[in-house]
Image (cartoon, grey):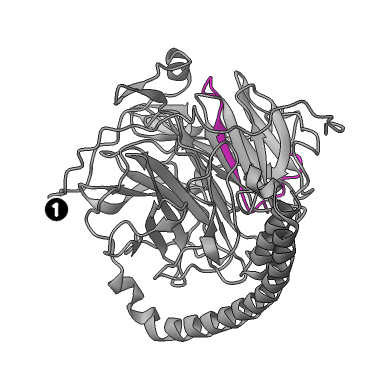
Amino acid sequence: MAFRFTIFALLRVLAWLSDQVAGGSIAAWTTGVGAPQVIMQDDATGKIFYSLCNSNGTSPIFPGNDTASFSLDLHPKAKTSLTGIGYANDGVNFAAFWYIDDANQIAEAFWECDPTGHFVPPSPDKNNWIVSTGQAVNESTGLSAVNLGEQSGYRVYFHDDHMATLIRRYTTADSWTTEGSISQDVVKTLPISAGYTDTNKISVVYGKGPSNIEVATLQQNGEWVLTTFPTPLNLVDQDSGNTTSLVPVTNDTAPQDFTLNLTSPVNWALDGWDGSAKGIGLTFDDDAARNVFYIGNDSLLHQVSETSGGWEASSGQSVQAWPTADSPNAQFASAYDFNLNRVWIYYVSGGNVTQVYRSSKNEWEPAAALRTFNDTAVASDEDAGLSTGAKAGIGVGVGVGVLALLALGAFFFLRRKRDRDARKQAEAEGDANAAVAHQHPSSFAGSPAPAYSSGATQGQWIDGQWVQTPPMKPEGQWQERYSYVPVAEQEPVYHEMANQEVTHEMPVDTDRREMPTGHHELGEVRP
């Protein structure tokens, strides 16, 4: 036992000596296999770190050092947004994520999980591209992405330089194009979050200003209907021949026509919200009701939930379940599995990347710092029976190991300095040609994914075939609230794309080790 403890201690020292992440933007998603995937940017350097992509159970392993960081041709701009999606194909996890590069363009990276739980390029070809060529992008924009499947492709939501909210679309038929706007409103906050329970039921949320949040919902006719809470928007005039009627605000509404209905009775407010939040999260319950999360200026996590009558603030949880963030308006990420009614939220608390988790029992479990390595190994019988001489040898070896770790510390420090100097030189030489050299190809293997990123598609393997589980809730409830038909393709087909004959959907994490779900003493619940 003492030997095992010493080895774990040495591993932790090694992790500390490595290049550690300084908290920044966070993104998270589910793949239907294992724990959620988490990526996080280092605010000091712009480097992006990831959780091990073979993490089991409900909690990922996040080393937070160079052993689990992406090597990117297009350098990420520090203190900017991240978003990503993932999927499993033939038992292998893939990840696509987007970020802002030093030239203020949206860049995409595509990676494959290797057997050790680390991400590697899926092919010798380029796996890092500019995907916003010809489109103005706000240099501090929030980003949010959804994966609509192999045919419908990706959507990335962002703010342009006028703070309108736009859609960047990818399909194998026409590569990357700007599909249009979901809102022309000149919003005052940057974070964006998008989600869905099915590919034709998409919502996008973002802050409108210091007192309200805006929600965009895709409709059956291809329009986006826009609402705000707590204070609603005024309806707008629509001319129909000789008559004028009042209609909801949509993506066609001009910026000057976005006005709040200040005479509407509003008996609640967004606690801790002042429009300065660095993150916002959208999740769905198993009945398709939407939830919006944010960390307020009080450093506390807040939830607003959709009800039959609109939106209302939800009760806070104990500090054991929702610990206080290390900074007000802090960065955070959310992921969800609406079929199993599960929600994951990640932010920095107590100096650690922390997981907040709602189980399928609709219970918020005690929050926990993410592990930095797999500490579940147990000592073997042989370990328990080591001779006195062997134990003495181990003691000497541990002493030598500590000296080696100190040497490694010096190595990592010098390497970090060297890498920074080299990167600055490369940036000075290559900025002018970066955008041209990294154009996204018309198609590439494995993208867009043949599965959904929301974790909505569930099922099981039976005799080598994937059998989808029937929906847990009737579809009719959704149709009462929202409706949608696919937007007609507006771009001509320029290339004949490679056909992906992939039929696998995402497996359910049925045989994975779950986090402990025992009962714990909880503290006071925040109002």
Q: Identify the residue shown where x is 46% and y is 55%.
A: 118
Q: Is residue 272 magenta?
A: yes
- Report the span colored magenta: 270-290
Q: Identify the residue shown where x is 46% and y is 86%.
A: 425
Res 23 quadrant in image: bottom right
- Residue 98 seen: yes
- In the depicted view, which residue is nearer to us: 210 or 74? 74
In the drawing, does residue 83 fall left or right of residue 332? left
- Residue 231 seen: no
In the drawing, does residue 271 fall left or right of residue 51? right
- In the depicted view, which residue is nearer to us: 186 or 444? 444
- Residue 418 horizontal/vertical position (percent): 54, 84
Q: Is residue 87 magenta?
A: no
Residue with the mark numbered 1: 495
Residue type, numbered disc 1: His
- Residue 75 horizontal/vertical position (percent): 45, 71
- Residue 175 horizontal/vertical position (percent): 25, 52
Res 221 quadrant in image: top left
Secondary structure beneath label 1: loop
Note whether 441 is above or below 347 in the view shown: below
- Residue 218 horizontal/vertical position (percent): 41, 33
| Image quadrant in which the C terminus is located | top right
Label 1 crowd bin: few (<14), some (14–19), many (20+), radius 10 Å: few
Q: Identify the residue shown where x is 77% and y is 33%.
A: 316
Question: Residue at the right extreme?
Answer: 524
Q: Identify the residue shown where x is 44% and y is 61%.
A: 137
